[in-house]
Amino acid sequence: MVIFLAVSTAFLIGFLLTPIVILVLRKMELMDSPGGRKIHSGYIPSMGGISFVTATFIAVLSWLDAQYIMEIRFLLAAFGLMFFVGLRDDMVNMSALQKLAGQFIAAYLVVVMADIRFTGLYGFMGIYDLPLWISYGLSFFTILVLTNSFNLIDGLDGLAGSISLVTFMFLGWWFFEAELMSYAIFALILVGAVLSFLVYNWHPAKIFMGDTGSLSLGFALAVLTVLFIDKNGTMASFEGWKFNAPIASGVALLIIPIYDTTRIFIKRTMNGKSPMTPDKSHVHHFLLRMGMRHDQVTLSLVFVKCLFIGSIFLGAGLSDYIMLPIVILGAVALGFRLDAMTLKRVKKINKNSPPILSKRTKKKSTSKPDIQGSVLEKVKMSDN
């Protein structure tokens, strides 16, 4: 009952607060302008993360008892810090080093203070326990990379929200099964908050989440996924639903941002560009070039994500030796297929489109211009 009330509170507050945020942002002229790499038309308010992050904290403080709040206090503090880092970046552009410093402090709170980290590789490659400094380093690196990878896919109406929604639903269910109730309620509260935002962010979007929202959600996803992998890898089978391939299962949960970031970094490097150079080579850009609408692209990628989540259920009894290659090779195969389909579709569109010069060429008119009688009379009077 508490879970239902907490999720409902997050949804209702987010649903009621978002229109107010839109109105305030419009009056303050804090808008995301079109042009450049932006694929939207018109001026759309950004910083929509204000509404669903606020709704999340209100629901947490309203329905979680003191014991649960103490269990996730460092996660809540880090989540709030990431919110302010994103808010500052949306209002006053921060350098990459400044953003990374803020993210590092947030990661420190959860990795060192809350002890949410990879304690080992859970038997993969024969490694069970990791030295503490390697455990910290690997956990810091994973959280920072996943946070920024999720931030990169926030380029389409409803995409980041929908991807995170599916993952938070899965994590909320799994933490509930593993009796990690504080984390389960937190994840499910985020489901309600994000769902309220999607009402206004679905195509055509009335508001964008901005870094205020994408960094916060990306960080929460990264931390909860690390916790899922470690707890799943160290738990006994009677303690909840156990996936025997914890690493592959974690990769499958965030397969869209992981694949997209890896793909564009490799492509940019092969083309002699900096991996950090922004462009329109993301997966969602390719799907748009095929003529799909924003909502169609979002639903397609959500469907792909659900397929990968389904695969870890089917292979729940298999180890990482089997499931990790399946997940990685499956993502690569789908990626190559997508590239081939996009290229074929773009060629077909270009073939059926008339040449540019033919659009500009107009037939010359042979009819004489019609001169009004009043103009002729004025000319005759001037001659006299």
Image (tube, rainbow, N blue to C red):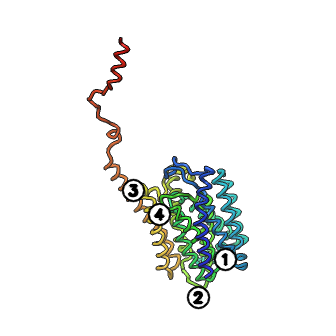
Identify the disc placed on residue 63: 1
> Image quadrant for the C terminus?
top left
The residue indicated by pointer 3 is 291
Placement of 364 over or under 302, stated as above or below: above
How far apart are the two marked residues, 2 and 4, measured between alpha carbons? 37 Å
- Bin the neighbour count of mark 2 within 10 Å (Cα to Cα): few under 14, some 14-19, many 20 and up: few
Front one among 375 and 292? 375
Q: Which residue is mark 2?
A: 238
Q: Nearer the viewer, residue 182 or 231?
A: 182
| Of the image marks 1 and 3, the number of the one nearer the N terminus | 1
Figure quadrant of the N terminus: bottom right
- In three-dimensional space, the C-alpha distance between marks 1 and 4, rounded to whole angstroms, equals 32 Å
Amino acid type assigned to the residue bearing label 4 in the image: Thr
Tell me the crowding category of disc 1: few under 14, some 14 to 19, or many 20 or more residues within 10 angstroms, Cα based. some
* Mark 3 surroundings: few (<14), some (14-19) or many (≥20) residues within 10 A: some
Q: Secondary structure at mark 1?
A: helix
User: Which residue shows up at 35% across the image and 23% down it?
Assistant: 375
The residue drawn where x is 50% and y is 59% is 157
Check disc 4: other Cα within 10 Å, few if <14, some if 14-19, many if 20+.
Answer: many
According to the picture, the residue beneath numbered tag 4 turns out to be: 298
Residue 181 position by quadrant: bottom right
Determine whether, in the image, residue 208 is placed left or right of residue 345: right
Tag 3: residue type? Answer: Gly
Mark before the other along the chain sequence, 1 or 4:
1
- Label 1 – label 3 distance at C-alpha: 45 Å
Pick whichever of labels 2 and 3 is earlier in the sequence: 2
Say what amino acid the circle numbered 1 marks.
Trp
Q: Secondary structure at mark 2?
A: helix
Mark yes or no: residue 278 visible.
yes
Hey, which residue is sitting farthest left in the picture?
366
C-alpha separation, residue under disc 2 versus residue under disc 1:
29 Å
Residue sticking out furthest to the bottom = 238
